[in-house]
């Protein structure tokens, strides 16, 4: 995901525009880190004792959480200056809530993340560059759908 000049329809002038470059499949994984017939990376994530599925998207600058997931819980959020998110299919959505410092367990490893709320269909969570950069140097093996961080693998 990269920031681009606001020029897409359906958003307020002056709001920053974020572009999501990947197209989610909308399928849910049979295994926690895989989607059947897909070349995307999926991880199991535990957020306040709720088991969720996270798409790993190196093209997204932010981490996102589905608003259906957040509304079903009592997660504390912060109102933020709104920004617009443009998806690869052309849809533009407004984001104005952030769930800061959320304690999660991702693939069995405890991590704290900020999650921005969006009505993302077919997804619980999208983990982007803001999550990946905290892990240090990363090698992605797209054939085996595996991430490698320094001396450990996920």
Image (cartoon, rainbow, N blue to C red):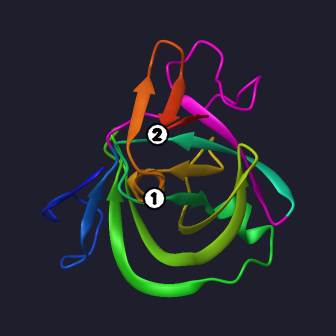
Residue 140 in the magenta stretch? The answer is no
Give me the disc on residue 150: 2
Residue nearest the viewer, comparing 110 with 66: 110
Q: Position of residue 50 (x, y in %)?
A: 84, 57
According to the image, label 1 marks what residue? 134
**Is residue 117 visible to us here?**
yes
Q: For the C terminus, give its image quadrant.
A: top right
Residue nearest the viewer, comparing 78 with 45: 45
Measuring 12% from the left and 63% from the top, which residue is drawn there?
A: 5
> Of the residues under marks 2 and 1, which one precedes in the sequence?
1
Q: Is residue 8 above or below residue 42?
A: below
Residue nearest the viewer, comparing 98 with 111: 111
Q: Which residues are magenta?
A: 21-48
Q: Residues within 10 Å of mark 1 (few under 14, many from 20)?
A: few
Question: How far apart are the alpha carbons under marks 2 and 1?
Answer: 12 Å
SS at mark 2 in the image? loop
Q: Is residue 19 above or below residue 76?
A: above
Measuring 77% from the left and 23% from the top, which residue is drawn there?
A: 30
């Amino acid at each position: 995901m990269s920031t681009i000049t606001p020029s897409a329809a359906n958003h307020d002038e002056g709001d920053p525009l974020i572009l999501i470059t990947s197209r989610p499949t909308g399928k849910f994984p049979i295994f926690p880190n895989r989607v059947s017939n897909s070349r995307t990376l999926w991880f199991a994530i535990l957020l306040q004792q709720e088991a969720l599925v996270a798409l790993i998207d190196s093209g997204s600058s932010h981490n996102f959480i589905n608003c259906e997931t957040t509304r079903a819980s009592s997660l504390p959020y912060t109102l933020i200056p709104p920004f617009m998110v443009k998806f690869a299919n052309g849809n533009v959505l407004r984001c104005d809530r952030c769930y800061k410092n959320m304690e999660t367990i991702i693939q069995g490893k405890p991590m704290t993340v900020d999650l921005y709320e969006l009505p993302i269909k077919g997804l619980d969570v999208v983990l982007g560059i803001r999550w990946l950069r905290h892990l240090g140097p990363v090698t992605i093996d797209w054939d085996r759908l595996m991430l490698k961080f320094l001396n450990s693998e996920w």
